[in-house]
Image (spheres, grey):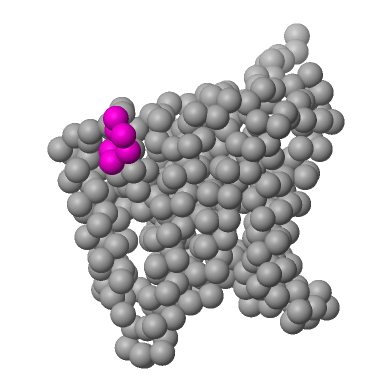
Amino acid sequence: MTNSSPSHPVHLSTWITLAFAYVYLAWGGTYMAVHVALATMPPFIIAGCRFLLGGGILLALVALFHRTDFHWGNRREWQDATVVGSMLLVGGNGAVVWAQQYVPTGIAALMFGSMPLCIIFFDWVRPNGTVPSRRTCLGLALGFAGLCILFWPSSDETSSRREILGKLALLFAACSWSAGAIYSRHVHAQGSPLLPMARQMLAGGAALFLISLLHRDWNHFSVAQVSVASWMGFGYLVIFGSLLGFTTYLWLMRVSTPANVSTISYVNLVVAVMLGWTVGHEPMTLHVFLGALVIVGSVMLVLAKKSARATVNATPQEA
């Protein structure tokens, strides 16, 4: 008599745990990938080509493997994709990539990581907006205090001016992404949920590519001069950050709870800061440590509420 045990498929909870671990690490690593790519590639070329490639591949994959859910999109859907893509990817991601020329990886992640707080603030001040609770107001106040700490200038005067410009760009990026996230709540699209994301990548990537032309990035750019490390950083952004990252995030939105998904918004920050400190050898000064502590705490305080469901659903966060 032979003993045979039936093969059991991997439990759903195991896949969910692996998916969370992937998004935590993959999106936390995008800031370091941008830093590596910037060594030999201009910022708007990185951002524009990344989203054009990512959006094109994603659209092709949906058309190939999910034909019944594929819908090219009507005029209104492409208009919405252009608006959302411009706010999320041009004003948001494009500004982050540009700012990382002057701002360390960890600080860039923390300042852009204040974006969930910006969304709640804008949702409050808009007409007929949602009045936040006392706990949420405390989180907003702590987040503002954390940003003030991170604005601490460096000792070098020239570097300090560049850092301030970069940090202002990061605040603009957080505000732009927040406005796009709020607008995207009212957008309706047919077919697979991956399709609006693909359209937004294509529209935002095209706008960033145009900016790279106007900025004359291509005049002094040579593909032959791009280092292997920069190509690896760029490839990481396209494949692990955009394609796999966003599809995994959307799957988690369907199978997990809003409270669990909200952890992505602050765990990413911790991963990015730790990578900047350990891999990028960025100094962990007292003001960076305090700023990280305050901002991560404020985001956790705000997103711990059940009312954060709409915020979570609209704000996948990666550089």
Q: Residue at x 28, y 75 (%)?
A: 152
Point out the residue furthest to the left here: 134
Q: Magenta region, mostly helix, strand or loop?
A: loop
Estimate the x, y position of residue 169 in percent, counting from the top left: 45, 66
Q: Quadrant of the N terminus?
A: top right
Judging depth in this view, the residue of 269 and 136 nearest the camera is: 136
Classify the position of the C terminus by image quarter.
bottom right
Q: Is residue 296 left or right of residue 6?
A: left
State left or right for residue 199 relative to residue 139: right
Q: State the residue at coordinates (77%, 30%).
A: 72
Question: What is the x, y in percent for residue 87?
Answer: 53, 49
Q: Residue at x 34, y 33 (%)?
A: 308
* Residue 229 is at least partly visible in this image: no
Q: Give the mark count.
A: 0
User: Is 127 included in the stretch rendered in magenta?
Assistant: yes
Image quadrant in which you'd find residue 111: bottom left
Write down the region rendered in magenta: 124-129
**Residue at left 71%, top 46%?**
202
Question: Residue 116 appears at what percent x and percent y?
Answer: 37, 45
Q: Is residue 219 visible?
A: yes
Relative horizontal placement of residue 112, taking residue 122 as reference (left or right): right
Q: Nearer the viewer, residue 12 or 241?
A: 241
In this rendering, the answer to whether 224 lies above or below 45 is: below
Q: Quadrant of residue 174?
A: bottom left
